[in-house]
Amino acid sequence: MTPRTTRAIVQTGPRQLELRELPIPEIDDDSGLLRIEACGICGSDAEQYTGVLPVQYPVIPGHEPLGVIEKIGERAAKRWGVEVGDRVAVEVLIPCGHCHACRDGRYQVCRGHGGMFGYAYVPITRPPGLWGAYADYLYLHPNAIVHRMRKDLPASTAALFNPLGAGFRWAVELPDTGPGDAVLILGPGQRGLASVIAARAAGADTIIVTGLARDAEKLALARELGADHTIDVENEDARKRVRELTGGRGADVVVEVSANSAVPVAESLWYAALGARIVLAGVKGFKPVPDFVSDLIVVKELKLIGAFGVTSRSYQAAIRLIEAGRVPVERMHTHDFPLEQAEHAIRLLAGEIEGEQSIHSCLLPGKR
Ligand SMILES: [Zn+2]
Ligand SMILES: [Zn+2]
């Protein structure tokens, strides 16, 4: 029996989270209700928590939902090809389907609902309220995009569909990475490690990952997951090392997924080979980039590609890779938390907890 209320973490302002009990809505023919098994925690959760990423309050955070279909309308079941009891991964964006971006095949930047419309970004004051995955239950809007996943994997492993989907979109789909490419990944966090796995799966030649001195463990994990070389940018001459490791050519693909600092954006131009593709995916709080030498873009004919969000195609690639089980993706997963510890989980990812680091972590609402 579905309960009448659900627990949910509600954010009422920067650094203000509270556990509330909210009513579970009725489901019509076109919508559904998801029982959350796991919600991945990512860098943008930390930005939402501190207020760097502005959202409308009060809001339920959590945009990386994995769960089991608890209830579903008849038309929704047909449209999605799923039934009660199926496990699904849910995409963050809820596209309108008819704005310019949607018609142009760029639904991940849809603004047709009058702004960004997706899980964790719609206030609870908008019915039916359950718009975030830091909760026991999530409302499945008629335009939500769901992907069925195998049920025999641990929920925290299946929840890696999100960072891995980003890895496939940012390190493979957008820069069109393939055999022979030297791929340089700036930043060894969950998106950087996911980019390693995706670039390896795409047949990239040399894969190099950069990080700071304090990232030593993450860089070791990057090598375990398929990186050929890693560079500690604080203690090594990164430009020189990249040249050496690519036979003097530079990287054909540079993926910028570091957090906060804008320095790697300027550096990426120096690392790039002639005609290289540079993907910028790490947001910097709208800071300008110091020492940005645009002439390098001209003389090397570089392509700078902005990446916002993930596409169904890349989510599918990630899900197939996870389900195939050939890559030990679960090595990226470091922590599970019950719902009550949402704040600690976010602060840990943000590096605010002294003496402890997480890479990929999940809230597991079923865990008490
Ligand atoms: Zn995310
Ligand atoms: Zn749209």
Image (spheres, helix red, strand yellow):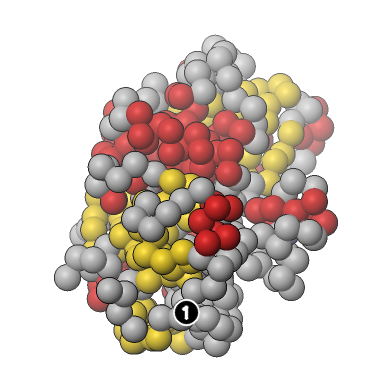
- Which amino acid does the dot numbered 1 rest on? Glu
Residue that extends furthest to the front in the rendered view of this protein: 74
In this orientation, which residue lies closer to the viewer: 61 or 73?
73
Ligand 2 appears in which quadrant?
A: bottom right
From the viewer's perspective, is 120 left or right of 226? right
Q: Residue at x 54, y 73 (%)?
A: 28
Residue 81's place in the image compared with 26, above or below, is above
Could you tell me if residue 243 is visible in this image? no
Determine which quarter of the picture holds residue 265.
top right
Could you tell me if residue 146 is visible in this image? yes
Q: Which residue is mark 1?
A: 26
Q: Position of residue 72 (x, y in %)?
A: 46, 64
The secondary structure type at the circle numbered 1 is loop
Q: Position of residue 132 (x, y in %)?
A: 46, 71
Residue 166's place in the image compared with 353, above or below, is above
Determine which quarter of the picture holds residue 174.
top right
Residue that extends furthest to the left in the rendered view of this protein: 368
Q: Position of residue 241 (x, y in %)?
A: 48, 24
In this orientation, which residue lies closer to the viewer: 259 or 181?
181
Q: Position of residue 236 (x, y in %)?
A: 41, 33
Q: Residue at x 39, y 44 (%)?
A: 149
| Image quadrant occupied by the N terminus | bottom left
| Image quadrant occupied by the C terminus | bottom left
In this orientation, which residue lies closer to the viewer: 210 or 331?
331
Q: Residues within 10 Å of mark 1 (few under 14, many from 20)?
A: few
Q: Residue at x 74, y 34 (%)?
A: 303
Residue 328's place in the image compared with 51, above or below, is above
Count of numbered tags:
1
